[in-house]
């Protein structure tokens, strides 16, 4: 078996993996990136629409253009990249002559490779929920795709899945595909969303639906799929006070259904390595260094929690690379305190913060509200608050804390910071 050794290994060659690897490399540590596809860039390579890079590069780019900026840097850095390589086994407590190491067993065109490293960064991204995840009733005809698969078919393979399209779910990929399918000559008849508010970014609601006069049915559930061999239509039933109203059901004729019903972090490897997962995000539980409960295993990007923008993915992943480099040097925070999701907050990431340094906390609201107040409490005391003009579950909230925010406070390892929306 071919054996390779590095200070750190990054699993995943998308934006998160490349950003983390570049940070590790610039810190002077040997690093490798493992990617199961035949190219770097991840899902960005099929996202040919613009809107990427406004924060990262201060200009508007397409997905491939954004990815290319990082790919060029990775190539110039001479970071070892293993393409067409799949990690089949991840052991986090392997031992060698140099002490405890993480061991990755990988399958590649060059055969089986064992890669040893001191640190591992998880950056595998996420996958789409499918029909089985949401249990749509009805027959099982051809013509039902996830929005991401349809995006690949149209943008990469050059195929058009159908002519008359209904999109179930208002996630960002589905909204973008509503516009894309319209551009290639299809008729997008509707977007159907079970929640009373859209799941995608406001800008995508405007640019992808309103600009194309595509109806959006909120508080509506898909209650049947018609068709034996091919899709012929769907039944939509509105909801009143959270209860289906069958007397208001109607049929939409179509030959194609695209599902945009959420994303799930790819954490099979994480689970196999003994990493604890957050039940709300389905991603790893991490501390202020973005390190999991397994010493030396870090997580960043969409494998940790689903982000709105790839710009935020890169920002978080650079920090993961920086913290992994600190850990390799033996530098760890002297104190970490817990974070907690309070009223109207679905989750808070990371699960712990270090008062001695800057922390960026990400969270999602569980409610739609104008003129909201985001509060951070330590016990009964409000130590920071911030007004939010508008919040909704589809848009991630970030909160930056600095050491001065904790000056004069009595804190210890049992202290809990609670974030809430009022």
Image (cartoon, helix red, strand yellow):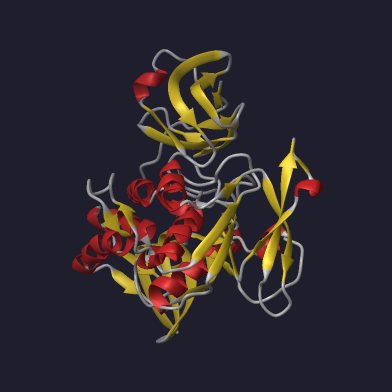
* Closest to the observer, 152 or 183: 183
Residue 64 sits in which quadrant? bottom left
**Position in image of residue 178 (x %, y %):** 48, 59
Residue at the left extreme, as displayed: 76
How many tags in the picture? Answer: 0
Residue 224 sits in which quadrant? bottom right
Q: Is residue 144 left or right of residue 174?
A: right
Residue at the bottom extreme, as displayed: 110
**Position in image of residue 338 (x %, y %):** 54, 31
Residue at horizontal 36%, vertical 67%? 45
Q: Is residue 144 left or right of residue 399?
A: right
* Closest to the observer, 119 or 140: 140
Residue at horizontal 62%, vertical 44%? 218
Residue at horizontal 40%, vertical 40%? 332
Quadrant containing the N terminus in the rendered view? bottom left
**Position in image of residue 7 (x %, y %):** 35, 61
**Position in image of residue 159 (x %, y %):** 45, 78
Q: Is residue 31 above or below residue 1?
A: above
Q: Is residue 376 above or below residue 106?
A: above
Quadrant containing the C terminus in the rendered view? top right
Q: Is residue 179 left or right of residue 233?
A: left
Residue at horizontal 47%, vertical 28%? 390
Say if residue 95 shows up in the picture. no
Q: Is residue 160 left or right of residue 135?
A: left
* Closest to the observer, 10 or 169: 169
Say if residue 345 shows up in the picture. yes
Residue 91 sits in which quadrant? bottom right
């Amino acid at each position: 078996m071919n054996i390779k050794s590095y200070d750190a290994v990054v699993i995943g060659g998308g934006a998160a993996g490349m950003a983390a690897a570049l940070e590790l490399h610039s810190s002077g540590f040997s690093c490798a990136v493992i990617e199961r596809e035949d190219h770097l860039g991840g899902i960005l390579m099929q996202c040919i629409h613009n809107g990427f890079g406004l924060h990262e590069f201060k200009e508007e780019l397409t997905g491939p253009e954004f990815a290319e900026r990082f790919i060029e840097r990775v190539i110039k850095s001479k970071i070892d990249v293993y393409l067409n390589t799949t990690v089949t086994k991840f052991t986090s407590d392997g031992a060698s002559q140099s002490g405890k190491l993480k061991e990755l067993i990988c399958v590649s065109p060059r055969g089986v490779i064992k890669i040893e490293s001191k640190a591992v960064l998880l950056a595998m991204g996420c996958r789409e929920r499918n029909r089985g995840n949401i249990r749509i009733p009805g027959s099982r005809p051809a013509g039902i795709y996830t929005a991401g698969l349809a995006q690949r078919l149209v943008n990469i393979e050059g195929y058009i899945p159908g002519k008359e399209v209904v999109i179930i779910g208002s996630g960002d990929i589905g909204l973008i595909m509503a516009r894309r399918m319209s551009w290639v000559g299809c008729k997008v008849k509707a977007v159907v969303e079970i929640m009373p508010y859209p799941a995608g970014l406001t800008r995508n609601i405007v640019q992808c639906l309103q600009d194309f006069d595509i109806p959006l049915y909120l508080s509506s559930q898909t209650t049947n799929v018609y068709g034996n061999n091919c899709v012929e239509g769907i039944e939509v039933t509105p909801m009143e006070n959270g209860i289906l109203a069958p007397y208001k059901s109607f049929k939409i004729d179509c030959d194609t259904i695209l599902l945009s019903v959420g994303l799930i972090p790819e954490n099979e490897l994480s689970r196999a390595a003994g990493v604890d997962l957050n039940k709300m995000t389905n991603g790893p539980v991490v501390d202020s260094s973005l390190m999991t409960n397994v010493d030396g295993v870090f997580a960043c990007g969409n494998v940790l929690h689903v982000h709105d923008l790839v710009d935020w993915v890169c920002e978080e992943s650079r920090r993961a690379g920086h913290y992994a480099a600190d850990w390799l040097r033996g530098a760890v925070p002297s104190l970490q305190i817990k974070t907690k999701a309070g009223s109207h907050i679905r989750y808070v990431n990371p699960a712990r913060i270090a008062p001695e340094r800057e922390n960026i906390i990400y969270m999602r609201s569980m409610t739609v509200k104008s003129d909201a107040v985001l509060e951070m409490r330590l016990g009964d005391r409000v130590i920071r608050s911030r007004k939010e003009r508008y919040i909704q579950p589809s848009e991630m909230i970030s909160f930056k804390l600095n050491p001065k925010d904790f000056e004069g406070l009595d804190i210890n390892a049992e202290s809990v910071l609670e974030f809430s929306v009022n």
